[in-house]
Image: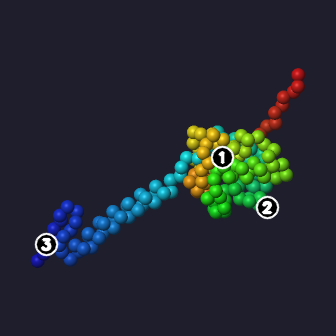
């Protein structure tokens, strides 16, 4: 009667010998594939800072949320700026493409009316709302990156998109 012998980690005899060999190899293959898949979903650091994203959220709530909604879902002619629909249209385009489009077309009726840093902040906020991670380099000095490299369409948990931020108070500077 053959005895099941264990040599290393492979079973070499007995009725279940082939099963256990395949089972151990399959588990190893699954672990390897899972590690590879996780590495593929890791996003690169975005070409913007946390401060730019925060300033961008304030500017967005003050200037853009009326049309694009506070949750960036869009309405009517104002397209969604976050989520699956946004990523479907923008995933292969670059962060600079997004900045340039916003700069030359927004706000509606007054394109090019904001300063360059405000447009950079708005772009940073939109990228962050789509899962982009802030990095150390300010947007205007960062390299242009494909959006699918830095965003996945999933808003980070720390970003509250359900309600508008408090309005930015108007500057009260009296002339002397």
* Front label number (2 vs 3): 2
Q: Dot 2, how many residues are within 10 Å of its Cα: few (below 14), some (14-19), or many (20+)?
A: few
| Residue 50 seen anywhere in this rendered image of the structure | no
Disc 1 and disc 3: Cα gap in Å?
66 Å
Q: Position of residue 15 (x, y in %)?
A: 21, 77
Question: What residue is shown with label 3?
Answer: 3
* Front label number (1 vs 3): 1
Q: Position of residue 61 (x, y in %)?
A: 75, 47
Look at the numbered disc 2 and give the secondary structure of its residue. loop
Closer-to-camera residue (77/13): 77
- Residue 49 quadrant: top right
* Quadrant in the picture for the N terminus: bottom left
Q: Residue at x 35, y 64 (%)?
A: 29
Q: Residue at x 74, y 59 (%)?
A: 79
* Quadrant in the picture for the C terminus: top right
Q: Looking at the image, is mark 1 or mark 3 earlier in the sequence?
A: 3
Placement of 101 over or under 50, stated as above or below: below
Question: What residue is shown with label 1?
Answer: 124
Disc 2 and disc 1: Cα gap in Å?
22 Å
């Amino acid at each position: 009667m053959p005895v099941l012998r264990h040599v290393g980690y492979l079973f070499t005899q007995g009725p279940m010998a082939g099963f256990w060999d395949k089972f151990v190899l399959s588990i190893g293959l699954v672990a390897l594939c899972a590690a590879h898949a996780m590495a593929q979903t890791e996003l690169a650091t975005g070409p913007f800072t946390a401060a730019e994203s925060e300033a961008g959220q304030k500017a967005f709530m003050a200037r853009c949320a009326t049309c694009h909604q506070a949750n960036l879902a869009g309405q009517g002619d104002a397209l969604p700026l976050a989520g699956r629909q946004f990523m479907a249209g923008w995933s292969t385009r670059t962060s600079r493409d997004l900045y340039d489009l916003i700069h030359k077309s927004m706000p509606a009726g007054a394109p090019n009316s904001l300063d360059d840093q405000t447009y950079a902040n708005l772009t940073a906020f939109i990228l962050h709302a789509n899962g982009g991670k802030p990095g150390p380099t300010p947007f205007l000095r960062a390299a242009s990156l494909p959006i699918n490299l830095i965003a996945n369409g999933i808003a980070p948990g720390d970003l509250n998109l359900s309600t508008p931020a408090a309005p930015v108070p108007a500057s009260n500077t009296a002339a002397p």
